[in-house]
Image (spheres, rainbow, N blue to C red):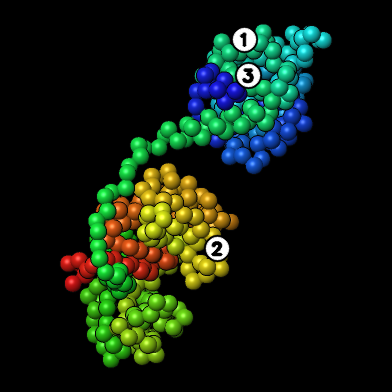
Amino acid sequence: MEALKLAHICGVLPDYKIGSLSCSGGEASLIADCASGTNLTFPPLDEAQVKGLSAALGPLVHLSNPLDYQTYIWGDHKVMTDTFAAMLEGPQAVSCLVLDPPRIDRCDDTPWTPARDCLIEAVRLKGARAVMISTLSETLTEAFCAPAIEAGIAPLMGLEDGLAAIEAMATIGIAWQKPPFVPLPEQETFTGAPVMLSEDEAKGYLSAAGIDTPKRVMCGDAKDAKDASALISEASMVYPLVVKGMGFAHKTEAGAVALNITDAGMLAEAMAGMAAPDGYLIEEMITGGVLELLVGIVADPAHGPVLTIAEGGIYTELADDKVSISLPAHKQDIEAALTRLRCWPKALGYRGKAGCDVGALVGMIEGLCACYLSAKGRITEIEMNPVIATPNRIVAVDALMAQMERDEWTS
C-alpha cells in the first residue's frame, strides 16, 4: 500500500539514493538501521547541501546524511524551511522527513504542523521529491497528511514499510530506464565438434571486433631469434616484451611464459629455454595495470549464452570473485555486474592509486557481447584472461576461443 501511495503521489524513482531529516539522533540511526540490507543508500552531503545547511543551522549541528537537525530550531519557520530546502538540493532521488505527530484522540498534533508546512514550502521552492515517513504506522492521520499530499509529498506510514516502498519504486524506475529488450538473434545450426583457435588467431578475431590486444608477432622456433628481432622491429614493438610458448592450455604451469624481456639477448635466451610445440608468440608487455579481469562468454545448454566477469589473472579460481549474466545484456546490466565484484574498488582508484577508464571497460565488454551474438552460434566460447585495465587502455592480454568451423580470417 505504501508503494502504491508513493507511485501515485511522487511517481517512480530514478535510483536508490535517499536523504533523511529528523530532529533526533535516535531517529537518524533508526532509519539508517532499517535501510541496512536494502539497496537504499545515503549519499554524502554535497557542497551545496553543506553550504546551505551550515548557513541555516550554524556550528551546533553535525552535518551528515541521515541528518539530525536537532530540536532547537523547532518552530522557527524560516530556519526549518531553509534547512529542509538545503537538504533537498542534494543528489538523492527522494528526501525523507521523519515525523511522528501524536494521536489526535489523546493529544493535540498542531505543534507538529510547522514541520509539515516547512517541508511543503521547501518542496515548492526546490521542486524536489520528498516524503513524510513515520516510525509508527498509526501516527500520520488523514487530516494531517492532506496538505502534504496536495503539495506532492507522500506520507509513508512505518519506517520499514516506507523504506520498502521507496526501494520498490526505485527498482521500477531503474528498470524503466533500460533500453527495450532485444531478443537473442536466431542461432544457426552447426555440426561437429568445436575447434579451439590459437591465441594469435583468437586475438586476431578480437582485434577485428575493435577490442584492444597487445602488438604481437609469431615466430616458428628458438633458432629464429634473429628473425624474431626483425619482426619485432617491423611491428614497431618496443621492449619490454613477453614471450609465450604456444601449444599449452595453461602456459604458466608449463613454464611457457617469460615476462619483462628487455633486450634481444634476453629474448633469445627465453626462447631457447622454453618449450613451444606450436611456436612462440612475442608481444608487447602491458604495464601499469590497476585491475585484472577475466571476461568470458560460453554457450550454456540450459541458459543460452552467459557472460562471466571475474577477478582475473593466474589466481582467478582462488579469488572466486565473479558474476554471471545472460545475454543479450544492456550496458546497465554490465555496469551493475562489475560493481558486484569485490575487486571493483580497484577500478575506481584505491588508496591513492589511479583508476581505469570505466567507460572504456564497459564498452569493451559490450563489444565482446555484440561480437559473440553476431556469430549466431558459431562461437561456442570466448575467454579473455587477463584483461588488464590501465588508466589509459583496456587490453585483452590473453585469449581463448572455440568455434564450430573455421572462417576465412583464420586461414
What residue is shown at x 43% (from left), y 33% (from top)?
176
Q: Which mark is residue 268?
A: none
Identify residue for label 1: 146
At mark 1, the secondary structure is: helix
Residue 57, can we see it? no
Identify residue for label 2: 320
Disc 3 and disc 1 in contact, CB within 8 angstroms: no
What residue is shown at x 51% (from left), y 35% (from top)?
171
- State which tag comes first along the sequence, 3 or 1: 1
- State which tag comes first along the sequence, 2 or 1: 1
Question: What kind of residue is marked 1?
Answer: Ala
Towards the viewer: 180 or 117:
180
Provide residue 90's location: percent of width, then percent of height: 56, 30
Residue 400, can we see it? yes
- In the rendered image of this protein, does residue 275 appear above or below residue 365? below
Distance from Cα at disc 2 to Cα at disc 1? 53 Å
Q: Which mark is residue 155?
A: 3
Towards the viewer: 118 or 409:
409
Question: What kind of residue is marked 3?
Answer: Pro
What residue is shown at x 40% (from left), y 37% (from top)?
178
Dot 3 surroundings within 10 Å: few (below 14), some, or many (20 or more)?
A: many
- State which tag comes first along the sequence, 3 or 2: 3
Along the horizontal axis of the image, is 88 left or right of 373? right
